[in-house]
Amino acid sequence: MKFFIDTANLDQIKEAQDLGILDGVTTNPSLMAKEGIKGDENVKNHYKTICQIAKGGEVSAEVIATDFEGMIKEGEILAALNPQIVVKIPMIKDGIKAIKYFSDKGIKTNCTLVFSLGQALLAAKAGATFVSPFIGRLDDISSDGVELIHKMSEMYNFYAFDTQILAASIRSTQHIIQCAEAGADVITAPLDAIMGLLNHPLTDIGLAKFLADHKKVNG
Ligand code: E4P
C-alpha cells in the first residue's frame, strides 16, 4: 500500500518524507492556492521543488483546462517537468479522452473527483494509472465513502484492471485504516492524519514503564 501526502506545503512534505514512508504527493488547485502559489512559472517551479523533496515519489499535478486540447497541452507541459509527475485530470467527458490519450503515450494519470462506481469503471477503462474517489466529500453528503472503496476494489480485482485506487479526501486517521481494510492501493492524506497512525496510549504507558524499569537497575 502506498502513502501519499495531500498538500502543497513544502514543510509538511519534508516532514512526511523524513519519516521514510512517503511514496508520493497529491496536490490540487485549492491546495496550491492555500500556499499562495500563483502564476504559471511559480506553479511549475513549485511542482519541481515538490518532486525534489519527494525523492522519486509520484507527484500529482492537476490540469486547469477542461477541454481536451487544453488538458493535453497542459498535461504535456506538466509531465515534462519531471518523470515523477502524474497528470491529474478531472472526471469529465474530455477528461476521459485525455486520460486515454496519455495512457496510450505511457504518461501516468490520476483521475480526480470520482464519486461513483460508474465513474471509477470509466476511468479504469480509459487506462488511468490512479483513480481518486473522494471519500470525505461523500461522507459530507451522508453517503458512504469507504463503501465506494470496497466496491471499486471488488470491481478492479474482478476485471483485473491495473488502475490503482487512490483513496482521497481523507479527513482522519480512522479513514486511513478503513481505506486499508477496504482494499485501497494508495491513500493520500493530510500530515496529521498520517501521524495519527503512530498513536496508542498503551504504547506510551508501556514505553514509560520499560524506561522506568531500565532506570531502576541502571541508574
Ligand atoms: C485529492 O487528490 C484531493 O487533493 C484531496 O484529497 C481533496 O480533499 P478535500 O475533500 O479534503 O478537499
Image (cartoon, rainbow, N blue to C red):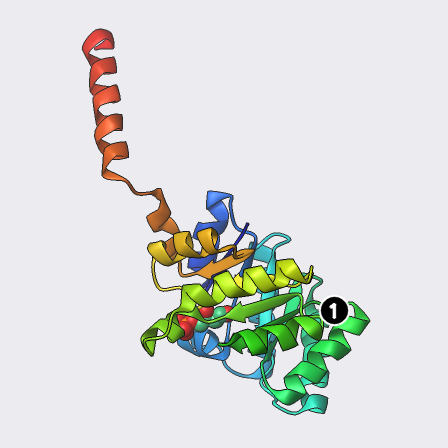
**Ligand 1: quadrant of the figure:** bottom left
Q: Is residue 121 left or right of residue 5?
A: right
Q: Is mark 1 within 8 Å of ligand 1?
A: no
Q: Is residue 207 left or right of residue 54?
A: left
Residue drawn at x 58%, y 81% is: 91
In the rendered picture of this protein, how many numbered marks are placed on residues? 1
- Who is closer to the viewer here, 79 or 4? 4
Residue drawn at x 70%, y 67% is: 108
Label 1 belongs to which residue? 107
- Who is closer to the viewer here, 138 or 62? 138
Q: Is residue 52 left or right of residue 38?
A: right
* Residue 6, x across and y down, in percent: 46, 64
* Residue 175, x across and y down, in percent: 38, 58
Q: Which quarter of the rendering shows the C terminus?
A: top left
Q: Is residue 58 visible?
A: yes
Q: Is residue 50 visible?
A: no
* Residue 23, x across and y down, in percent: 56, 52
- Who is closer to the viewer here, 36 or 206? 206
* Residue 123, x across and y down, in percent: 64, 75
Up-down relation of residue 185 to residue 40 (above or below): above
Residue drawn at x 67%, y 82% is: 96
Residue drawn at x 73%, y 71% is: 80
Q: Amino acid at mark 1?
A: Ile
